[in-house]
Image: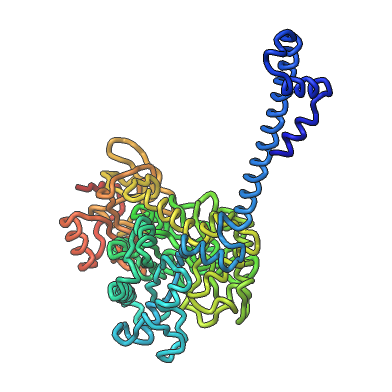
Amino acid sequence: MLRLLRRSRNSMSDEESDALDASQLLGSSDTAADESPSAATIDSRRESRRSHFVFLGIILAAAVLVLVVGLSVGLSSVGGGRSSDPMTRAEDLLAEYPVIDGHNDLAYELRANFKNQLGDIDLLKNTSGQYGVAWQTDIPRLRAGHVGGQFWSAYMGCGEPHREDATRTFLDQMDVIKRFVQNYTSTFLWATTSKDMELAVPANKIASLIGVEGGHAISSSLGTLRQLYELGARYMTLTHTCNTPWAHSSTDTTSNGLTDFGRRVVLEMNRLGMLVDISHVNNYTMSDVLATSKAPVIFSHSSAYALCNNSRNVPDNILMKMPANGGVVMVNFYPGFINCSSTASLEQVADHIDHICSVAGVDHIGIGADYDGIDRVPYGLEDVSKYPALFAELLRRGYSDSDVAKVARLNIIRVFQEAEEFVGKVIGTQMMKTAKVEVTRMVLHPHVLKVSSIRHTDGRSLYIPPAFSQYVKRRKKYLCHDPESSCRVGDLVMIRSCQPLNKRKHFTVAEILDLSPAHRAEIEREQGRLGELEGTPGTTEGSSS
């Protein structure tokens, strides 16, 4: 500042300098006679000083601007004040945005190795190499991996003996998940909503949710599906490695996808707010689900088919549909799905994330490692403690802090929130309701009616596409599909697949939705009787009460 003032003084003209010196040497009484020349000199000096102060202001403003820009650049270069070291930065980010993983099979290991006897294992200790099992999950390693949420898988293989007891086994698996959550309440928080997932973070707990792995769990019953939801299941994988009667697995190379009943399963899951998981299904089922579902779907543990052409992975044509649906692909770590071999690396897992990001976008990626459901793991991702190493690799590849937060947890929370928006909502297409109708077409068997169209007694005609045609018992109460109607949950009543068994004169009721007790009792009596169909072909009227 002194230098600037000296420079200002030196820049004055000789006349101004002389005048200034004279005024300093002479007293005010001595200069009274020269008042007019002194006034001009003073004005000139004031103008000069004004210009110098403006110049100084500009210099100071520029200095402040340079300082601010420098600080902002410095902060952005280390991620908003975080370390520039990728691993340290990943640890810091995951402390704020802990991982929510879409699939862990710890419950299956407890069933397979301990028959669900939780007293035989202590999850507070590092279980690696203990109990004769290569465990990949325990509480110390979950903490080290910054896991803040986990969908625990309730699983029974669809090819296991006694598959007719599948529903009971799934209930046992859900029970053991609830019990170990209750046994370690300082670590786990039972969660059934997206809000619960968020509340776990300030509580420093791991939000624990249940995913049912395999549609065979419901035994083709929507009532069972609803009860699994009531007990805490928040997603269901539509198939495992076997087809269900209504959806086709990734092991099925045919062009079959969802059946009509499969579409009803998807829509009922939408209504419940239950996530539809399409890992394990074939490409045709994937497409059918995306065309049917009103809510975002998930792949709870799948990777990119373009990098490993395993049918368990997601092809690009499906990835391209994810933005429109809003769903998320949660990347699996199994080497057979990552590298199509028995080995893989952390970097190759990151390659799958890169690919999904390039095709679907970073808003549609998550993590579904499948720990304790896989017998081989990638180098660098040996257990649940290794998540920070993967996110450090993403940071090295240029992913932003925001991207990391999305992949770690925010994407799956968003999907869950959007699915919850459909809870209880009416979905007008492909729903069933009772109707007083007159059969207008019927053929096939002397004692069986095939209904291909119906007409309300008020004269309004409705067309039933051939795919929805049903066989119904003559001269009995029955229900028809009305694709144009929307109705309340309480109105949903349907008898599905009423058809002759082995071309005999018998029928069965395969599905009943929300019947009143009186109607249910009547239908169950008819089921138990399996009586012969009566009557001869002709126009028949049926009514519902």
Vertical comparison of 121 with 55: above or below: below
Q: Residue 349 lies in what quarter of the image?
A: bottom right
Quadrant housing the N terminus? top right
Residue 280 visible to an observer of this rendering: no
- Relative image position of residue 163 (x, y in whole percent): 36, 78
> Exactly how many numbered labels are in the figure?
0
| Location of residue 536 in the rendering, given as x and y in whole percent from the top left corner | 28, 55
Residue 281 position, x and y percent, is 50, 66
Picture residue at 33% right of the left edge, 75% below the top: 173
Q: Pick the residue in front: 428 or 92.
A: 92
Identify the coloring.
rainbow
Furthest residue in direction left, as rendered: 518
Above or below, 482 against 534 in this view is: above
Q: Is residue 468 left or right of residue 408?
A: left
Percent x, y for residue 286? 51, 60
Q: Nearer the viewer, residue 466 or 379?
A: 379
| Residue 5 falls left or right of residue 517 | right
**At 63% from the left edge and 62% from the top edge, which residue is drawn?**
354
Residue 240 makes an appearance in the image: yes
In the image as oriented, which residue stretches furthest toward the bottom? 132
Q: Nearer the viewer, residue 502 or 372?
A: 372
Instruction: Say which residue appears at 40% left-offset and 65% top-offset.
Output: 236
